[in-house]
Image (spheres, rainbow, N blue to C red):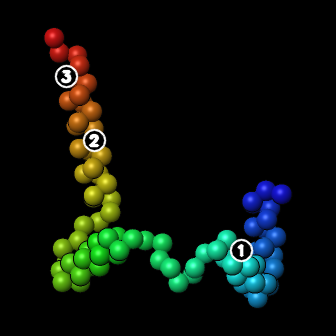
């Protein structure tokens, strides 16, 4: 049975049965649901960024603006790299 088919079967179950399946898998896989999946360093970074945002909520940039800036920098670096390879 494929993963997609298994998920379809689980989704067709009642919420209580879905919860039972989830709890059974967590137990059988030995996963501690109280254990964080991120490191302490990652938690500290997130807390720092969140505190920075809360201190200055007006100092944010739209996601699209940041992506456009990154793409422009990458394109510029690729162009420079290409020009460097072509020049004598």
Name the element at disc 3.
Answer: helix
Task: Using the image as rendered, state which of residue 59 and residue 41 is in the foreground.
Answer: 41
**Residue for badge 2:** 74
Marks 2 and 1 sit apart, C-alpha to C-alpha, by: 45 Å
Marks 3 and 1 sit apart, C-alpha to C-alpha, by: 56 Å
**Residue for badge 3:** 84
Answer yes or no: is residue 53 visible. Answer: no
**Residue for badge 1:** 28
Q: Which mark is residue 70?
A: none
In-image side of 84 versus 38 (left or right): left
Kindly give the residue lying farthest to the front in the view shown: 30
Name the element at disc 1.
Answer: helix
In-image side of 10 versus 65 (left or right): right
Q: Nearer the viewer, mark 3 or mark 1?
A: 1
In the rendered image, the quadrant that contains the C terminus is top left
Quick one: label 2, few (<14), some, or many (20+) residues within 10 Å?
few
Task: Using the image as rendered, state which of residue 66 and residue 36 is in the foreground.
Answer: 36
- When asked about the image quadrant of residue 84, the answer is top left
At horizontal 24% and vertical 67% (from top left) the residue drawn is 61
Answer yes or no: is residue 79 visible. Answer: yes
Q: Position of residue 48 (x, y in %)?
A: 24, 76
Q: Position of residue 70 (x, y in %)?
A: 27, 50
- When asked about the image quadrant of residue 8, the answer is bottom right
Marks 2 and 1: CB-CB under 8 Å?
no
At horizontal 76% and vertical 88% (from top left) the residue drawn is 16
Q: Position of residue 28 (x, y in %)?
A: 71, 74
Name the element at disc 2.
Answer: helix
11 is higher (above) or lower (below) than 73: below
Quick one: label 1, few (<14), some, or many (20+) residues within 10 Å?
few
């Amino acid at each position: 049975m494929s993963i997609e088919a298994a998920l379809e079967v689980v989704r067709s179950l009642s919420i209580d049965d879905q919860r039972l399946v989830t709890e059974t898998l967590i137990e059988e896989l030995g996963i501690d649901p109280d254990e964080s999946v991120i490191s302490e360093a990652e938690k500290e970074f997130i807390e720092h960024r969140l505190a920075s945002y809360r201190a200055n909520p007006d100092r944010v940039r739209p996601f699209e603006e940041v992506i456009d800036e990154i793409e422009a920098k990458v394109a510029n670096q690729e162009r420079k790299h290409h020009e460097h390879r072509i020049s004598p």
